[in-house]
Amino acid sequence: MTSNSYTFTKADKELFAVYQTIYSQSDVEMWYDWNARLNDTKWSDDCFFIYQNGEKIGGVIMSPNFVIYPFLISPFCDRRLYWKLVLSHVKAISSEKEINLRGVSSADVEILLGFGAEIWRPRQIMCRPTDALEYTLDDEFFIETPKESDIPEMSEVLRESFLGGIAYRTFGEDSLDTVNQSIKDCFSLYTATDTWNHSAVVKRKSTNAIVGGCIAGINPEMINRFSFIDDMFVLPAYRGKKLGESLLKHSISAAHKDTTVVKLHVLIGNPAEYLYRKLGFISGPSFIDMKYKVNAY
């Protein structure tokens, strides 16, 4: 009986990108674009093909800190053996105590749990066509495109809206300065493409106070010029009034003149996913980030 020999060989990233795009069979970012999927893989020089007795059986981008973009090459189909090889190799090259396993497919989660990895953050991209949508608001509220001067108040409301939620439990609490800078960055990006109007805030008529918002627009580097919803938020005291639904419909409608598709990124288990599906968003493949303690076993 011939024993198998397995090796990891540094790959040309142009060729690696083609293999990964074909054999991963997973457009997790919902790019709908061949070149975009290729380019999404070419950012790293740490590309490796895995060989069994001189024949390619898979590939992975791997560094001492993380593992990403795993794939098997047909007809090789032993996913457990594949991950045993990858984890053994990363343990050999890493001095880190913990490795991030990024973009793990649902088919591999149970296998990696069996190797001692832990689920960190299950995520997915969702998208839907832009369109002119109608919505109605209670007379107490109105929606408008936020002004730059609204950003400090938006930051406070967004931060308060997320406290205790799934993003808070997953990533921890961001400082007010961090949230404020994030919205400023979006403002700069989206004003550069004249799409800041895809964003919206909902205010109380009586006080002009912001109680919710939707931050969206087209990043100059976004493939296919899809609009992207970065954050949608409503203060807890104002939920149940269809403010989130109205904000999303407003953003989808505002984007309609600029692009055909609006996308968003959601943590699986976020209650907002129900609203997104209600409004016609569909999800791409789920991808789960996991953590693997190198010397746990």
Image (spheres, helix red, strand yellow):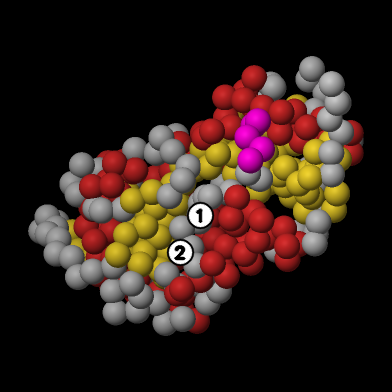
Pick the residue in front: 268 or 110.
110
> Residue 167: where, in percent of width, then height?
48, 41
Q: Which picture quadrant has residue 57?
A: top right
Distance from the alpha carbon under mark 2 to that under mark 1: 7 Å
- Identify the residue under disc 1: 27
175 on left or right of 143: right
Question: Where's residue 294, x and y in %?
Answer: 80, 28
Magenta span dominant secondary structure:
loop
- Is residue 6 in view? yes
Residue 53 quadrant = top right
Give the residue displayed 73% in from the left and 66% down from the top.
14
Query: Where is the N terminus found, in terms of image quarters?
Result: top right
Q: Secondary structure at mark 1?
A: loop
Q: Which residues fall within the magenta stretch? A: 75-79
Circle 1 packing at 10 Å, graded few (<14), some (14-19), many (20+), is some
Could you tell me the amino acid type at mark 2?
Tyr
Q: Is residue 199 visible?
A: no
The extreme top residue here reads 297
Please tell me whether residue 77 belongs to the stretch shown in magenta.
yes
Residue type indicated by callout 1 = Asp
Write down the residue under mark 2. 32
Tally of numbered discs: 2
